[in-house]
Amino acid sequence: MTTRPNPSDEQISEIGSDASTPGFPGFARFSRRNMLLAASAAAAAPGIGADAIAPSAAQAQRFEYPSDREAKSAARALALESLLIEKGVITGNTVNTVLSFFETQMGPFNGAKVVARAWVDPAFKQLLVNDTPAAIAKLDLPKGMAGAEGEHMRAVANSPMVHNLVICTLCSCYPWPVLGLPPYWYKDPTFRARAAREPRAVLKEFGLDIPPSVEIKTWDSSAQIRWFVVPERPAGTDGASEAELAKLITAEGMMGVARV
Amino acid sequence: MKLQHYLGGLEGLGPVTFEKRVFVEPWEKRIFGIHVAMMALSSQLPLAATPSRFNTVWTWADLRKGAESLNPFDYFKFRYYEKWLGGISGYFVQKGYITEAELDARALQILQAPSTAATQGGDPAIDRRVVTYLIEGDSPKRDSAMKPRFAVGDKVSVKNVPSIEHTRLPGYLRDRIGTVDIVYPATYTYLTSTGPDGIGDAMPVYCVRFDPEEIWKGNTDKNVAIYADLFEAYLDKPN
């Protein structure tokens, strides 16, 4: 059982004891007041039928965001970073070092090069699908292609008969070295919930109409493998160089939610 | 049961927001960077020691546990990095690196003087270890004499294990029958022991294929297969 620090008496009177979010004192500040408001509104209207509007109003209050939501989060993030620097946990450059690494060393620009090579070299494509790390190691990419969140990557290739879609219903597992960091749609609980049961409908919303005759294979990243998709090479690119092809390839294409 | 473990297949959610940005507010980058630093400086990694005062364990499992233990309404209410900010702040308070009072006081000070810049300084060896971690990763693969219980093509039934705090078994697969598609070579640990849920120690992992029609009968798209990577502890021979 996770324990959380005891808030002071003053905080308890302000936010209540928040047993529902252990280890998340930050959340009490956001949500506890609304939750109490919601609970009291619901208690005042215990009936159903004609009174049913009351619980829904309570629910609306519960999901109300404070108007200074972003300013407060920004202040707490900066406060935390500053305290961690002052206490010698991280340095004044640590966060920027991480961000710069993802801007220059680990990102979809690597995956684009991998896919472009697969489009021009069938033997490489075969190796990429059979032994993804071995294929990636053949390219001149930054150090770390088997690094964090890329220790065990596997590529799956689209074909005229099969379309692949990568999801993570439990969290947001994503192949960092070749794709960088996951975009918001991938982390969205709605996407994660719906893509498992109705991938065709979700892809259609994304603008990708997969014909009924094409099988959709959905890969739920629930253990060590980080999956990515080798999309099909678009028509009309016969004269394009590998570097020109790489420019066409997006993170969305390599997760299976967009055509390239 | 925790709703967060059962997201797959949940109905009535409406359209997906096709937001392609990784960060939608500048502060989200800061909490992401802090999380990566914590993973890199985590005490169980076999990397060179640094002068960092960080001397406890922080892995994906800790971050995920935080999100999985949230009130499910909060889980849907808060944006991805809002959950991280809450969980990571809570960890630093819980482990005694900072107090909640000083975090509140500093945040208030920043709110009142929004141009406040982050503190500077620190030993560059800390940042070098962070980059080393990103480059080297932390593979859970372990060589082991343990023989996989199942082979490609075998039917397997997914157990409904008691997942108290944290699991890597998607809820929609519990009690379902699938077919082994890949037996991954070697064995794999998980970042922490999940207790009665059953993972942590090195064990075989399989890619198992499921027919969505058997999971959501009459209520799923046609001509679709769903694959999930599952630890052996989650699988059994069908009755």
Image (cartoon, coloured by chain):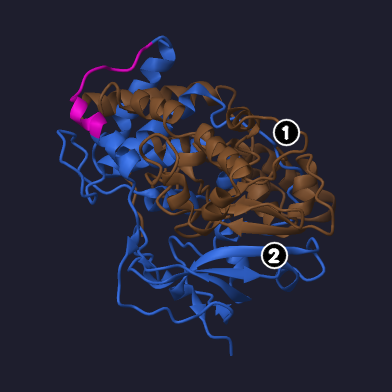
Chain colours: A brown, B blue
Mark 1, Cα crowd under 10 Å, few <14 / some 14-19 / many 20+, is: few
**For this view, does B57 lie left or right of residue A250?**
left
Q: Is any atom of residue B81 visible in this view?
A: yes
Q: Secondary structure at mark 2?
A: strand
| The magenta segment | B116-128
Tell me the tag on residue A237: 1
- Give residue B83's position: percent from left, percent from top: 49, 40
Mark 2, Cα crowd under 10 Å, few <14 / some 14-19 / many 20+, is: some
Q: Is residue A65 above or below residue B151?
A: above
Question: Which residue is drawn at the image coordinates 73% and 38% (left, top)?
Answer: A234
Question: Which residue is drawn at the image coordinates 32% and 36% (left, top)?
Answer: B37
- Give residue B47's position: percent from left, percent from top: 20, 44
**Is the stretch drawn in magenta largely helix, strand or loop?**
loop
**For this view, does A50 lie left or right of residue B176?**
right
Question: What amino acid is found at the position of numbered circle 2 in the picture?
Answer: Ala
Chain designation of label 2: B
Question: What amino acid is found at the position of numbered circle 1 in the picture?
Answer: Thr
Chain designation of label 1: A
| Residue A24 quadrant | top left
Q: As drawn, which residue projects farthest toward the bottom?
A: B239
Question: Which residue is drawn at the image coordinates 52% and 50% (left, top)?
Answer: A171
Tell me the tag on residue B43: none
Residue at the disc numbered 2: B225
> Label 1, label 2: how many angstroms apart (C-alpha)?
31 Å
* Quadrant of the snapshot with the C terminus of chain A: top right
